Amino acid sequence: MRHGGSVERGVLIGLAGLRWAAWIGLAAVALVNLHRDQHPVVVLLAVSATAAVTAVDQVVLIGPRWRSALGPGLVATEVAVAVAVVAADGWVHQAAATGQTVAGIWPLCAILGAAVAGGVVWGIGVGLLLSAARFVAVFVAAGTNAVIGRDLLGAFTTGASWIVFGAVCGTIIHLLRKAQHQLAEADARDHIARDLHDGVLQTLALIERRSDSPDIAQLAREQERDLRSYLFGDRSQAGNLRTQLGQAASRAERAWPTTAVTVTITDDVPPLRAQQVEAVVGATTEALTNAAKHGHAAQVVVFADVDETSGGLFLTVKDNGGGFDPATVTEGVGMARSIRGRVEDLGGRVEFASAGGDGAEVRISLPVTTRRWANRG
Amino acid sequence: MADPGAGPAGTAAHPADAPVYTVVIADDHPTVRSGIRADLTPPLLVVGEAGDATAALALIDSLTPDLVVCDLNMPDGGGLRVVRETTARHGDAVKVVVFTVSEHEQDLLDAVASGAYGYLTKSTPGPELHRQLLRAVQGDPPFAPQLATLLLGEFRRVARQATGTNPLSDREREVLNLVARGYTYKQVGKELFIAEKTVENHVRNILGKLHLTRRAELIRWAADHDIR
């Protein structure tokens, strides 16, 4: 089983690393320039507050309750500290002296943390808050003097990039979560498949075999087929064809309860266009009707595979019914129009085979232009 | 829980001196077992039932039945273990037919490769089950079209991955293809102008080759993963 929330955990571990790197940068610049700053105490406060947040987040992450690193308490604290540190530059003037603000890249950690916790909205929100703090710093630094255009532009650029950063992080996290959710769902499905397999499928098979009522047996058979196609099918290239042939088989069995239809498909069937699937399923339905209605077949096997020489589709419908003699029997309207017509319209070929009394077989070959099947496996 | 009195009601039609084939049923669901038992009219005779692999193997060793009808998904190592150990201890004297709802390709192929004599799905109607099991016990492996289809894919995969040549002969491929399409052995013989017995031999050879390729694959896998 995949670990639930592994996306969050992974990002948080990365974020913790980033936070330490940001803090080391922040502390180094601050301490080296401490003598140039106007309010060294504020700088020291900033260094210690960020150190505290970094350490607390790290400790929480190591422990079993690592999820609380995403809780509103820790996220809000980090955002508050980031806002304060960004705004602090207005009083400290570190940027004016060194070109480096007090905050450095520290605010990115707060944005990323918020984006992990609350998605795009929180990411953008915190980006906006920090931008506001940045403008506060610029205005406070200017004091009674007019604000310098260059500083304003700088604040604007930084603020905009923070907001974009928040949005991007939120989106990526959202996509990662979605992907993880899908994986978890597939996992859960496999798991359920294994469990149900022995329960529900067994029961349905038993009902099918033992029920005195053909209606109930038929219902069980349909349910079994549907459940199977949900649990085991649909993920291969053969999925769509498999599902639709299965449905055609169920319809035929419902219409002629004394006929049992088995559908078997190899994984090598080439991918088909919707139009091709429709034609093949239509032709199969017609062949099943013929087998049941005219051949009075008890069993019919529908088989689909790749045509090894052409790479196209090869499909057969074989029954154990009365059959017919292809030499003497004129093809019925149903066979001629529905089977031949559908298949030959798409460039395919149809053959009817029967040795009177020994069942009949309809063989369909359909060319497929893509050759992707050759690269599979 | 050997149960010699398990023969169903309709025994009258069966003459007393005709051969009787003994069967052990292994399935963890009691309802499924009683369902199978109801279908196995003479000359098939259910002599014992087991709900897990260990119990099944003990029964098989003490009763040496002609046939074992065995589910794949069972506690204690499952049907795969029953197949493997029964084949190792009794060879062809006790034929194990896998009777399952499973369509997990690997399980099935492994079961057949481990020596399962045949494979049938649980949706097989009662009379058909009886017919197929009777054929099995008389030496004709029951071989569902679904399994033939799986084998077609499996051998193709082996050919693509390993040697580039298909381990099956052209004739064996034709046989497999026709069985997958629902042909009976008799019809396969007619179609290919060979005797029904020859078709059976081809099927046996195909199963033998599956056994070999699965084993070769296991060995290669073990080597790749540095397991000695």
Image: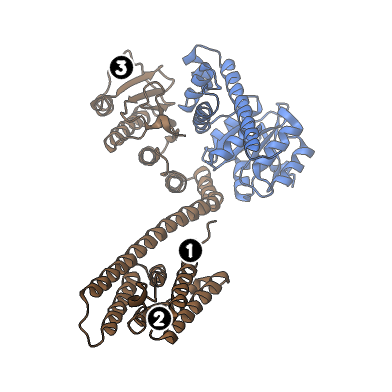
Chain colours: A brown, B blue
Amino acid residing under circle 1? Gly
How many neighbours does mark 3 have within 10 angstroms: few (below 14), some (14-19), or many (20 or more)? few
Question: In what element is the residue under mark 2?
Answer: helix
Between the residue at mark 3 and the residue at mark 2, the CA separation in whole angstroms equals 105 Å
Query: In terms of depth relative to the viewer, which is nearer, B70 or B132?
Result: B70
Q: Where is residue A219 in the image (x, y as percent from the top left)?
A: 42, 47
Q: Look at discs 1 and 2 and give the one toward the viewer.
A: 2
Q: Look at discs 3 and 2 and give the one toward the viewer.
A: 2
Q: In this view, does A34 lie to the left or right of B28?
A: left
- Chain label for disc 1: A
Mark 1 or mark 2: name the one nearer the start of the chain.
1
Q: In this view, does B155 lie to the left or right of A148?
A: right
Residue labelled with disc 2: A36
Residue labelled with disc 3: A329
Mark 3 or mark 2: name the one nearer the start of the chain.
2
Residue occupying image coordinates x 68% and y 48%: B51
Between the residue at mark 1 and the residue at mark 2, the CA separation in whole angstroms equals 33 Å
Q: Residue lying furthest right in this view?
A: B62
Between the residue at mark 3 and the residue at mark 1, the CA separation in whole angstroms equals 75 Å
Residue labelled with disc 1: A14
Tell me the quarter of the image containing the C terminus of chain B: top right
